């Protein structure tokens, strides 16, 4: 090769690298910031673009006759404290599991859970056995179901 061809190849390669670097530097990347993206949470991060499941909510107890009880704040706690001990994976009495939202929703809508939680204390079909739910807990479950049994 002649020296002119070497110089031409050198400049072509140099131009190629320069073009590549300029192109690479001019590209913008979507930067993701993880954090809590729910504005109702205590730790809401306005700059977060991806929810990392870390949202923390103000504790609200279900102690009033709430007409719209929320699953996560009210209903899940009732079932966790009163039902899961006997109705969980590996220990599902009667084949009924009540550990997840879908299982609880199915049980209150399509099974007789609503009927069994309101039975008299002496009735052997009362659930939970030996520890009847409070009137408030029963009311909250009934309200949740009448509002569509939402996972909110």
Image: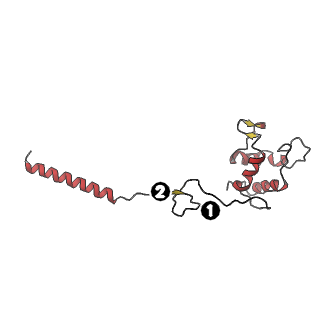
Residue at far top of view: 90
Residue 87 place in picture, x, y as percent: 75, 40
Residue 14 place in picture, x, y as percent: 20, 53
Graded by Cα atoms within 10 Å as few (under 14), some (14 to 19) or many (20 or more), the crowding at tag 2 reads few
Say left or right for 132 vs 39: right
Tell me the residue at 86%/50% (across/down): 118
Say left or right for 60 vs 115: left
Marker disc for residue 12:
none
Residue at which label 2 appears: 32
Tell me the residue at 54%/57% (across/down): 35
Residue at which label 1 appears: 42
Graded by Cα atoms within 10 Å as few (under 14), some (14 to 19) or many (20 or more), the crowding at tag 1 reads few
Residue 104 place in picture, x, y as percent: 73, 47
Tell me the residue at 81%/49% (across/down): 114
Placement of 145 over or under 122, stated as above or below: below
Question: Which of marks 1 and 2 precedes in the sequence?
Answer: 2
SS for tag 1?
Answer: loop
Residue 54 place in picture, x, y as percent: 59, 54
- The image quadrant of residue 36 is bottom right
């Amino acid at each position: 090769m002649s020296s002119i061809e070497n110089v031409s190849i050198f400049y072509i390669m140099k131009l190629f690298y320069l073009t590549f670097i300029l192109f690479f530097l001019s590209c913008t990347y979507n930067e993701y910031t993880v954090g809590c993206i729910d504005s109702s949470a205590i730790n809401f991060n306005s700059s977060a673009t991806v929810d990392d499941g870390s949202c923390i909510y103000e504790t609200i107890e279900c102690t009033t006759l709430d007409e719209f009880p929320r699953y996560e704040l009210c209903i899940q706690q009732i079932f966790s404290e009163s039902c899961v001990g006997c109705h969980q994976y590996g220990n599902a009495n009667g084949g009924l599991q009540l550990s997840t939202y879908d299982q609880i929703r199915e049980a209150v809508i399509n099974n007789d859970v609503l009927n069994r939680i309101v039975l008299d204390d002496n009735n052997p079909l009362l659930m939970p056995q030996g520890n009847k739910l409070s009137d408030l807990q029963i009311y909250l479950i009934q309200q949740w179901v009448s509002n569509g049994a939402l996972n909110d």
